[in-house]
Amino acid sequence: MRRSGLRGMKTAVAAAVAVAMTIPLTACGGQEQATVDENGKPIVRIMVRRNVTDNPIEDMGYDAELEAACDCTIEWSEVDDNSWGQQKAPRMAAGEFPDIGLTLYDYTDISRFYSEFLDLAPYLDQMPNVKKFFEDRPVALKMAQDGDKIYNIPSDRGKGYRVSATHMFINKTWLDNLGLEVPTTWDELEDVLEAFKTEDPNGNGEADEVPMNIRSLGFGLWSALVLLNSTGIATSFMGASASGQGFYVEDGKVKSYYTSENLKDVMTFLHELVEKGLIPKDSLTRDASQYDAQTIGDGETATTGVSIGWSTNSEYGQLADQYITLPPLKQDASMPDSEVKWDYSADATEFAYSVTVSPDVPNLDAVLKVIDAMYGERLSVEGYFGSIPAVVSDDGDHQYTINPDVAYAEYTDTRAVALQDRFGGYIPDDVTMINDTNAEYVTASDEACREALANVDPTGDVIPIYVRPDSSDMETLQNNNTSIGNYANNMIAQWFQNGGIDEQWDEYVAKLNTPSLGLQDNIDIWQKYYDEAVK
């Protein structure tokens, strides 16, 4: 690992001073690590999880500006997602924690190893940028707080990502070709899908159209179970949310999607589409490449009519112009507009758990300076999008322009030249980003959902992202969820492919309510923490 802060000439005097000032720090495995560099500057070690690690942070201007802000030397170590998934548990068990961790740990990890994380609450006055962030973003503060302590500072990538993570799309070109209107109910959608199947909407003379494509039937990103929102209850399918475990709120009471009549209605509708050949029957067993082959295809001829994803661009590539977001559907025409909802995942999309600090850092003052610098406007922009001026220009008056020839040379986003969503930082609402195509596409995709999203009570319809059980209760939840999921998800897959939900529903609900599966225990746990956080 090279030390990027050793810039310029090193004199014998500076080296001698450094030797005198260096206090050995014993690392895991018995190796000693210096706490200051040859120039006597404090060393801060940062470990970050990244999507792409072939462009070292040490080579970015971001690193140099952080070092200047703390008057320290930063030593970076980078790990990709797959490697970190294998390394995290052994490293934590061995007590190997970096001075600063970026997007390495969530609150489940922290709750198991409290003694390995520094409570940052007493140091907020030394981090005015972080303090301002919490004042501006109350949700972020609630995410950070563990009682009166703060072990993990969230990041905020800005208003461009204050969106639902899930959207339904429909091929508007196909609708126009067939003289059809955008559907507004489940029945109208079914009629449109039947036309997509039988009337050659892509005009190539082949029966190659897939009327509706789905990825999954779980409580997660881009799931067809997002249609639960059409029935009047809300989802929040992103991250380790309570919704992602199958729980929602109605009239202040925590309930389970698994046993709701709403789920029964959704599964009845989806199976009907499968039975008519409007959704591929093998949807739950295909891999991502098979799905992409039908949505992105050859980039010239569209073969998918409706699907569910992040944005039109990410879902359809060069075919994106043919698609629009399908406004959230009503279950039936008699349903009032005010009852239609949509996936409320904006908090999880905008914020992420990010910065942790080891309690044993030898240079705490320098560490606090580094973190505070990260949460300043300029370095937040650089951390997320790329260094100034190499990748991003500072236009003045809180406006920045991304150079697409540099930022998007390899990817449709900036992960090769920046930390992107693995950064620590805060991009305020008065910042304007030009050429942030990812935000532009997803914001455009989100517009059609805004009316339905306004019908969601963020603390009355979903369990907020900042509601967190303690480690003991989390372990109970996880164990019970395994038993519940093994049974319920298998039944859902059967109903999707083969039907039979009407005949089997009562037995299924009774089975889920048996004490041995722990569904009621999980509801009681979430109710306890929901009441504490919200009421």
Image: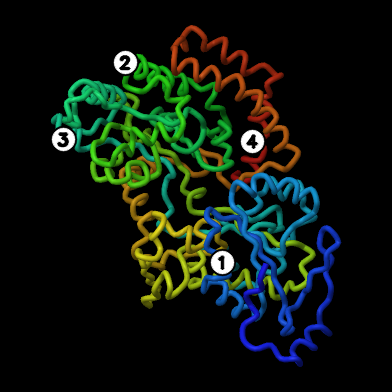
**Badge 4 or badge 1: first in the primary sequence:** 1
Whether pointer 4 and pointer 2 mark residues with C-beta atoms closer than 8 Å, the reply is no
**Badge 2 or badge 1: first in the primary sequence:** 1
For the residues carrying marks 4 and 1, which lies nearer the camera in this image?
A: 1
Q: Residues within 10 Å of mark 1 (few under 14, many from 20)?
A: many
Which of the 4 quarters of the picture holds residue 38? Answer: bottom right
**Badge 1 or badge 3: first in the primary sequence:** 1
Q: Is residue 6 left or right of residue 292?
A: right
Amino acid found under the numbered disc labelled 2: Lys
Label 3 belongs to which residue?
A: 176
Q: Position of residue 224 (x, y in %)?
A: 42, 30
What is the distance, in whole Å, between disc 4 and disc 1 at their CAs?
Answer: 40 Å
Label 1 belongs to which residue?
A: 57
Q: Is residue 348 left or right of residue 144?
A: left
Label 4 belongs to which residue?
A: 526
What is the distance, in whole Å, between disc 3 and disc 2 at their CAs?
Answer: 23 Å
Of the 4 image quadrants, the one containing the N terminus is bottom right
